[in-house]
């Protein structure tokens, strides 16, 4: 898959046409999604805050090695698929807040992290469905893999005031499953390659555009060479 557009944002941007876009963000930003079938591939830096207003179905994938706060407002029966991929050897916090602003809105939030070296990674993932937002769906799946002396904490919160809605969350912190590593080794794969397979599979949960995937590969290479 090839990225169609590379954009360096200033402080605000609206997307009124469908497409696939790579965004590099290094300052607080507001992004409005007005068209259907928009796919955003973000690289975020400098401990920023990003606000999204989602008016049509959207996929957002973010790569970061630093703290970030993401606020997402979902309108107009829109569906959001959001992926947050974090790799760190520092103490950082990633906060994701999802607000269902209309009836029958859907959010699927996946947060995966690698905490290695002296890393201390925290995910705070919060979903909000207020009274009257009937038919809304709020799903969260958060996982952090600890390597070396890495630490982690996940706070999955669901604030649901509407009975006629669906909300789910799951969370895991810890190492890769040793049984999986052992299984791969029994197939003739070296321990290093087995680890690399698990690492890439964990961080690449959907197909990524080639030039965007290379950004993630460069970050994961530091984990492999540690």
Image (cartoon, helix red, strand yellow):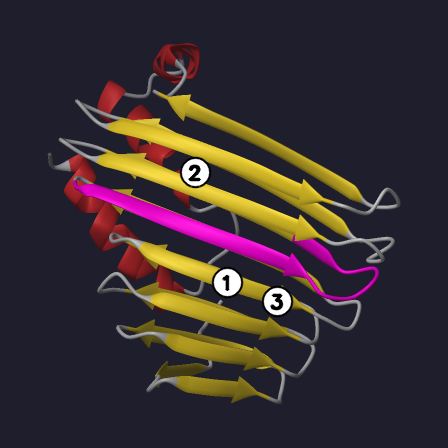
Q: Which mark is residue 201?
A: 2
Say what secondary structure mark 3 lies in.
Answer: strand
Number of numbered discs overlaid on the protein picture: 3
Name the one closer to the observer, 201 or 143: 143
Say what secondary structure mark 2 lies in.
Answer: helix
Report whether 68 appears left or right of 51: left
Q: Which residues are magenta?
A: 90-107
Name the one closer to the observer, 215 or 154: 154
Q: Could you give the CA–CA distance between mark 3 and mark 2, rounded to whole angstroms?
A: 29 Å
Could you say where residue 135 lies in the image, as x and y percent from the top left? 86, 53
Q: Which mark is residue 71?
A: 1
Could you say where residue 52 lies in the image, as x and y percent from the top left? 53, 71
| Dot 1 alpha-carbon crowd within 10 angstroms: few under 14, some 14 to 19, many 20 or more | some
Of callouts 1 and 2, the N-terminal one: 1
Say what secondary structure mark 1 lies in.
Answer: strand
Q: Is the residue 120 above or below the residue 164 in the image?
A: above
């Amino acid at each position: 898959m090839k990225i169609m557009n590379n954009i360096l944002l200033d402080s605000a941007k609206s997307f009124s046409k469908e497409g696939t876009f790579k965004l590099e963000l290094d300052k607080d930003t507001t992004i409005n999604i007005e068209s259907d079938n928009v796919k955003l591939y973000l690289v975020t830096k400098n401990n920023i805050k990003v606000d999204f207003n989602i008016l049509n179905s959207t996929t957002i994938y973010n790569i970061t090695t630093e703290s970030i706060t993401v606020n997402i407002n979902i309108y107009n029966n829109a569906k959001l698929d959001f992926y947050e991929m974090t790799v760190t050897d520092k103490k950082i916090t990633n906060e994701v807040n999802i607000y269902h602003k209309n009836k029958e809105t859907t959010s699927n939030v996946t947060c995966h992290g690698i905490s290695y070296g002296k890393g201390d990674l925290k995910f705070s993932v919060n979903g909000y469905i207020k009274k009257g937002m009937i038919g809304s769906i709020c799903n969260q799946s958060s996982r952090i893999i600890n390597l070396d002396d890495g630490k982690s904490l996940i706070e999955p919160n669901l604030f649901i005031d509407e009975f006629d809605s669906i909300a789910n969350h799951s969370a895991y912190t810890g190492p890769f499953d040793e049984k999986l590593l052992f299984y791969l080794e029994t197939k003739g794969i070296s321990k290093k390659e087995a680890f690399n397979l698990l690492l890439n599979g964990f961080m690449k949960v959907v197909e990524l555009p080639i030039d965007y995937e290379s950004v993630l590969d460069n970050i994961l290479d530091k984990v492999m060479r540690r």
